Amino acid sequence: KFLFKNVKKLPSDALFAIKARLAVDTRSAKVDLGIGAYRDNNGKPWILPSVKRAEEIIKADPEYNHEYLNISGLEVLRKNAARIIFGDSFDLANRVVNIQSLSGTGALHVGAKLMQVLNLNERDIYFSDPTWGNHYQIFQKSGFSNTKTYPYWDAASKKLNLTGFLNTIKSAVTGSIFVLHPCAHNPTGLDPTQEQWKVILEAIKEKQHLVLFDSAYQGFATGSLSKDAYSIRLAITDILKDVPVLVCQSFAKNVGMYGERVGCFHVVLPETGYNAEDKDAIQSQLNAITRSELSTPPAYGAKIVATILSSDELYKAWSDDMITMSSRIYEMRHKLVAKLVELKTPGTWDHITTQVGMFSYTGLTEEQVARMEKEHAVYLASSGRASIAGLNDGNVEHVAYAIDEVVR
Ligand code: PLP
């Protein structure tokens, strides 16, 4: 008998299934608002000018090679990655233990594995409702069987359900794990205000929950790295400074390095209460996870990002690139809404302009989304999440007409 006879067929990943349907759609007006990847105003992938420049610099180096990195990754990347997320003035040398990861997903995986090593996988882990779908399986596959949700999006008001969020923080078992999106929440594009972050983090502190920040869009919410790291910095320098905080960092979106898989996983140590041996022990666990799974992390993308982060000139160019991306998305939100208003499309649409980052949670129902695809060749997630980066001057009106038709 075939050894793999009873292998259970799993459903395909919803977003990659959209990508596959789109690829075979022959309609010329097709629009991809599915996967969260930036597109330029011609609907094409955009290699950031800062990335192109960094590639030239790397390749011109006579020492350029394809040797293995260390197990923990490229030192310059790790140091500068921590600097941009935690800030120049943070005590990086003492309070950060980190490792290069396979982008944000790999960082989440290392975080999950580390918690499994520490038996924290037996605790309840809370994700926002809704969240990035992959969160569940990343943690479930590392032995977290108690995955739960905290209320986040209030469908009726299209606003944050702060009361529900706080009630769940308060009623969760002490010492649960809370996965937070520090900015540009996926899928809703809705972030807590600075005041709301204070209340959320205070409530978390009160119940001694462990926080894991999943930072996949730093720079995408406001165009500013420091503004987009507000919640993380508030936690580590103030409200949660007496406990460890975990941070997953992706360079997929903000440097446009999607397929190169560049990221870091950080353990931010409390201000006091640990010593050098504790730090070494944590680093050794992170290294052991990586050694057994990747051996060493990939070098090429890491070198590009490290070159950008460690050069004043390229850092400046990259900051401009982030503004280019975030302002084009901002402009598209406004163009879409202006057209919907002009068409007198039933419903309110201002949430599309108040939401931030790559996505808009449009409020379209599953049936309406299906009709958008079938009748208008406009592809988005069945939850109604649209990747606004897929809009451009050439298709925004078509998308507005499609929305108008399906909601009437
Ligand atoms: N976390 C969130 C919330 C995301 O939206 C994504 C990507 O869509 C990721 C993590 C991981 O992305 P990557 O592994 O490409 O860095």
Image (cartoon, rainbow, N blue to C red):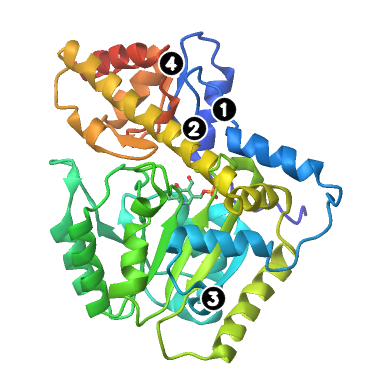
Disc 1 or disc 4, which is closer to the eye? 1
How far is the residue under mark 1 from the one under mark 2? 6 Å
How far is the residue under mark 4 from the one under mark 3? 51 Å
Q: Which residue is denoted by mark 4 in the rendering?
A: 377
Pick the quarter of the image with the N terminus.
bottom right
Q: Residue at x 26, y 77 (%)?
A: 205
Q: Which residue is denoted by mark 3 in the rendering?
A: 93
Q: Which of the two labelled residues, at mark 4 and mark 3, occupies the earlier sequence position?
A: 3
Q: Which of the two labelled residues, at mark 4 and mark 2, occupies the earlier sequence position?
A: 2
User: Which of the 4 quarters of the picture holds residue 331?
Assistant: top left
Q: Position of residue 137 (x, y in %)?
A: 49, 57
How far is the residue under mark 1 from the one under mark 3? 37 Å
Nearer-the-camera pick, 226 or 378: 226
Disc 4 or disc 3, which is closer to the eye? 3
Amino acid carrying mark 2 in the image? Tyr
Q: Tell me whether circle 1 and circle 2 mark residues in contact (CB < 8 Å).
A: yes
Q: State the SS at label 4.
A: loop
Ligand 1 within 8 angstroms of badge 2 C-beta: no
| Residue occupying the far top of the picture | 28
Q: State the SS at label 1.
A: loop
User: Which of the 4 quarters of the picture holds residue 382?
Assistant: top left
Nearer-the-camera pick, 3 or 328: 328
Question: Going by the image, does 74 lie left or right of 8?
Answer: right
Q: Which residue is denoted by mark 2 in the rendering?
A: 38
Q: Tell me whether circle 1 and circle 3 mark residues in contact (CB < 8 Å).
A: no
Amino acid carrying mark 4 in the image? Ala
Q: Which residue is denoted by mark 1 in the rendering?
A: 45
Q: Position of residue 154 (x, y in %)?
A: 18, 47
